[in-house]
Amino acid sequence: MATASPQRTDGRPAPTPQPTLGESLRRNGVSRRGFMQFCAATASLMALPPSMAPAIAAALESARRPSVIWLSFQECTGCTESLTRSFSPTVENLILDTISLDYHHTLQAAAGDAAEHAREEAMHANAGEYLVVVDGSLPGPKANPGYSTIAGISNYDMLMETVADAAAVIAVGSCAAFGGLPKADPNPSGAVSVQDLIKDKPVINVSGCPPVPMVITGVLAQYLTFGKLPELDQYNRPLAFFGQSIHDRCYRRPFYDKGLFAETFDDEGAKKGWCLYRLGCKGPMTYNACATMKWNGGVSWPVESGAPCLGCSEPDFWDAGGFYDALSVPPGRSGDMLLAAGAAGVAVGTGAGLLARSKARTAEKQHETVTAEQLEEKL
Amino acid sequence: MTAMEFLMLTKGPLFQAALAVFALGVLVRLVEIFALGRAHNYAAPRGSAVAGGLRTMYKRFEPNPGTFKAAPFDVVVGMVWHIGFIIALLLFIPHVELIKSTFGIAWPALPNPVVDAVTAITLLGLIAALVHRLAQPVKRFLSTPEDYLIWGVTFLVMLTGWLAYHRMINPYPLALGIHILAAEIFLVVLPFTKLSHIFTAFVARYYNGAIFGRKGVQS
């Protein structure tokens, strides 16, 4: 906020007062009806009674645009793609547009020094109030920082400096939340997740590869409405979106329960839309909102399009076995292990058996016959 | 440790280790038995030892009328839960997928609700068997700690599987990890306890039948 900004010494103008979210939305042509629909959807997603929708609307209307600094580290830009792709200007998209995104590599026009100035300016002007959104993992403090730098600053230094005065950190995508692809075995760049490094600030993980767009806007809406962060699960993910498994909300679940499975991608079962468990669906162990919120404005989602869930919102999903192997199939080469151990077992068993036989033969050889007279002599 | 790390531990290194102990232990025991061989029989054979052995391997699946009369509970409940255990182990779709990935062979499986019902019956059968063992003074007297141990590992693997299927433990990676861990305990305990009867029972049946087959009499 302009009033809270410190005295400027660099001669640049102080930030101007930001419009409220309600003003921005109206300016962007979002109808009252559309806005209220979004608030009702947000309320239901957060498991709040419908009567809370007007309260959310009122809070969002008067909310100042929160300053958001978006840091992109070891990532593929898929998360940004997910959050910005929209076929029509939805309310979710406008919420995203109307937050004061003061620094975002991929989206901002500025580059180099000017970009870094924008980040520092936003940090000073909104100290203690701004949100930091991170996508991508980063080389840990013990790793070579050269694996990922921005404007000559290591990812680690930039994160620590930016988070120091932040209100909270939102780790967007599985890389930021859990390390993701860069952290996959053998993790050549020593990648770690945001929560591995940030211990003194609230970290909200919005996992997914990429995450559902509505989830991030939902988290922002909740923060703007209640001024506090949502309830989180054991992985610090918002419970409202990650509280239920894909399997439990999957429209193909009745086929699983009936034991009807597609066995290849083009068999009769696949054409009839049967369960994809045998084709590697990780839905039973994956907690995300895809099955209820879907993708591309509610058009479809992976399982609906015939692809098994990869489990992308779970930690270490890259190393959790083949994408097209059933959930019960262990990673690694179990068959080889079985053969090796079996061969060793045959060898040891043969050895033990032969040893016992030779013992018996030796005992037989050492057996001496005695006559009745000899026995009597001994007695 | 998170639930996912636990699942990956049980599916990965622990599974490999349990598989190694199982394969090594079972084969050491079986191969040692075979390597020991049998004492040479100098009498002229009156029938085929092999045919007699194979026949008895199969015939022993049929309950003996005398045994049934003396202990109907043991025969009926014992058969019910043994068959249930084998169905759940070999004909549940996730297990068939696991066997396919490990051994490269697969066979048709049963629909989930059928395996679910069979598992419930098996669990009840196992509980009934334990109650009977505890309630009968003779059985209780004859029971050793090993008997209770193998009942425990068998019951646990069935129970955890059933709970995981019904998603009664949350989150699911924890439920599945517990079931896989129970199965691994079963595999590790198997070669060193009476559970090895899963394999050695057939060796004993064969030898038994072969002895009588050679003599030309029924066993």
Image (cartoon, coloured by chain):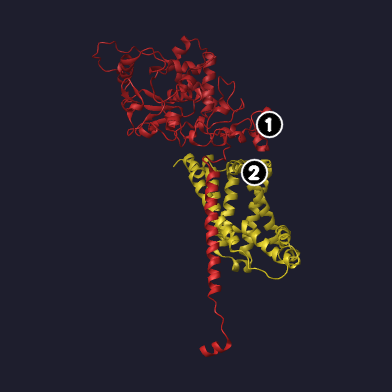
Numbered label attached to residue B38? none
Local packing at callout 1 (Cα closer than 10 Å; few below 14, some 14-19, many 20+) is some
Q: Position of residue B69 (x, y in %)?
A: 74, 65
Mark 2: which secondary structure?
loop
Q: Which mark is residue B92?
A: 2
Q: What amino acid is found at the position of numbered circle 2 in the picture? A: Phe
Disc 2 to disc 1, how far (Cα)?
A: 18 Å
Kindly identify which chain the residue marked by label 2 belongs to.
B
Closest to the observer: B25 or B109?
A: B25
Q: Is residue A131 above or below residue A196?
A: above
Q: Which chain is yellow?
A: B
Quadrant, the C terminus of chain B: bottom right
Mark 1: amino acid: Gly
Position above or below: A201 against A91: below
Seen as rendered, the residue at the extreme left is A9
Q: Position of residue A359 (x, y in %)?
A: 53, 68
Circles 2 and 1, Cβ within 8 Å, touching? The answer is no
Does residue A205 appear in the picture of this structure?
no
Residues A49 and A275: in front is: A275
The N terminus of chain B sits in image quarter: top left
Image x and y of residue A1, in percent: 34, 17
Residue A72 in view: yes
Residue A250 picture location, percent across and down = 60, 31
Question: Quick one: label 2, few (<14), some, or many (20+) residues within 10 Å?
Answer: many
Q: Is residue A106 left or right of residue A300?
A: left
The residue labelled by disc 1 is: A269
